[in-house]
């Protein structure tokens, strides 16, 4: 399995830090956000990693290199202008190949997420192991988190392991997902396209699976959040509590 790390965003709310440093290279606990992901992916045996970039992307390549220092093989997909998440995947398609892949946002902090679990979540069979099941297989599998203070209404409901656009309670998409490349067939390389509307389309077709991750998870969106995570007495609590 290959991985993709989204690193093309401008990080407007993190200015002035992101005027000179790409957001994924900002450090939490002495380590760039993106390096936490790389090390955790490698730990799970996922060593072929595609990184898209736009704003100050040359710094990302200079800092991370070919990935050998982490035991990884890093490949880069340069975007002149950030193409959003789905657009970024479509542009990187030749690097990712056609097999299911895991994708994670470069600006979240999930130091204990075990990427080993992502390898077998998309099966061409039902939950009982029947490869001839009549139900359409999942086209993607998303990891949800408890709603943080800044997103109290959440994104998706959940019935068993199937995500829905309606229903209550709702959970927040944790920006970690496993996808089949066919999901992006309609998006041409270079197109600007968001992932959210695409996920909702397939959720209506009952083709989106998922589960809740309740470990440490933080979307590092502001300078204040970054400072709180780096504070000496910071409590690394799950997304719904503590530092946000």
Image (spheres, grey):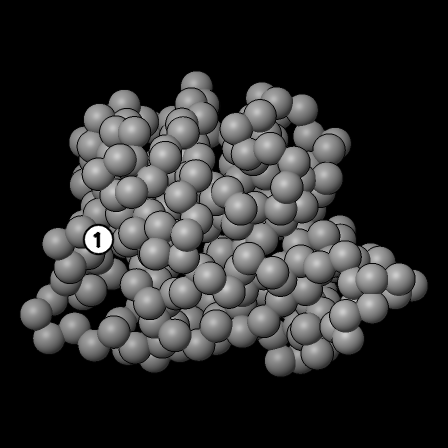
* Local secondary structure at mark 1: helix
User: Is 119 on the left or on the right of 69, as rendered?
Assistant: right
Which corner quadrant holds the C terminus? Answer: bottom left
Place of residue 92 in the rendered image (x, y in percent of width and height, measured from the top left) = 53, 29
Direction from residue 34 to residue 224 in the image, left or right: left
Judging depth in this view, the residue of 3 and 120 nearest the camera is 120
Q: Quadrant of residue 231?
A: bottom left
Pick out the residue farthest to the top. Answer: 80
Label 1: how many Cα within 10 Å (few below 14, some 14–19, many 20+): some
* Residue 79 or residue 47, whichever sits in front: 47
Q: Nearer the viewer, residue 72 or 168?
A: 72
Left or right of 211? Residue 62 is left
**Residue 93 or 85: which is nearer the viewer?**
93
Label total for image: 1
Residue beneath the point at 70% across and 78% down: 160
* Placement of 89 over or under 160, stated as above or below: above
Whether residue 221 appears in this view of the structure is no
Q: Position of residue 49 (x, y in %)?
A: 42, 39
Residue 10 lies in quadrant: top left
Q: Name which residue lies at 50% across and 42% down.
A: 2
Q: Which residue is labeled 1 in the image?
A: 223
| Residue 181 seen in this snapshot | yes
Q: Residue at x 67, y 24 (%)?
A: 188
236 left or right of 150 in image: left
Residue, x 43% and y 48% (percent of image)? 46
> Going by the picture, which residue comes out furthest to the right?
134
In x, y percent, where is residue 195?
60, 45
Residue 78 lies, with reference to residue 120, above or below; the image says above
* Residue 58: x %, y % from top left: 27, 23
């Amino acid at each position: 399995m290959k991985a993709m790390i989204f690193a093309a965003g401008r990080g407007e709310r993190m200015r002035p830090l992101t005027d000179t440093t790409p957001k994924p290279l900002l450090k939490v606990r002495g380590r760039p956000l993106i390096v936490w992901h790389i090390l955790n992916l490698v730990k799970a045996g996922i060593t072929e990693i595609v990184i898209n970039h736009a704003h100050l992307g040359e710094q990302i390549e200079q800092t991370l290199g070919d990935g050998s220092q982490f035991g990884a093989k890093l490949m880069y997909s340069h975007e002149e202008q950030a193409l959003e998440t789905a657009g970024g995947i479509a542009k990187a398609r030749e690097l990712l190949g056609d097999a299911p892949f895991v994708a994670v946002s470069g600006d979240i902090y999930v130091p204990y997420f075990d990427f080993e679990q992502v390898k077998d979540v998309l099966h061409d069979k039902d939950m009982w192991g029947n490869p001839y099941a009549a139900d359409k297989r999942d086209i993607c599998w998303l990891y949800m988190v408890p709603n943080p203070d800044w997103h109290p209404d959440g994104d998706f409901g959940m019935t068993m392991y199937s995500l829905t656009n309606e229903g209550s309670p709702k959970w927040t998409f944790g920006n970690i997902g496993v996808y089949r490349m066919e999901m992006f067939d309609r998006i041409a390389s270079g197109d600007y396209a968001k992932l959210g509307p695409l996920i909702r389309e397939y959720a209506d077709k009952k083709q989106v699976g998922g589960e809740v991750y309740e470990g440490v998870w933080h979307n590092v969106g502001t300078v204040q959040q970054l400072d709180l995570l780096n504070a000496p007495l910071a409590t690394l609590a799950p997304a719904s509590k503590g530092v946000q």
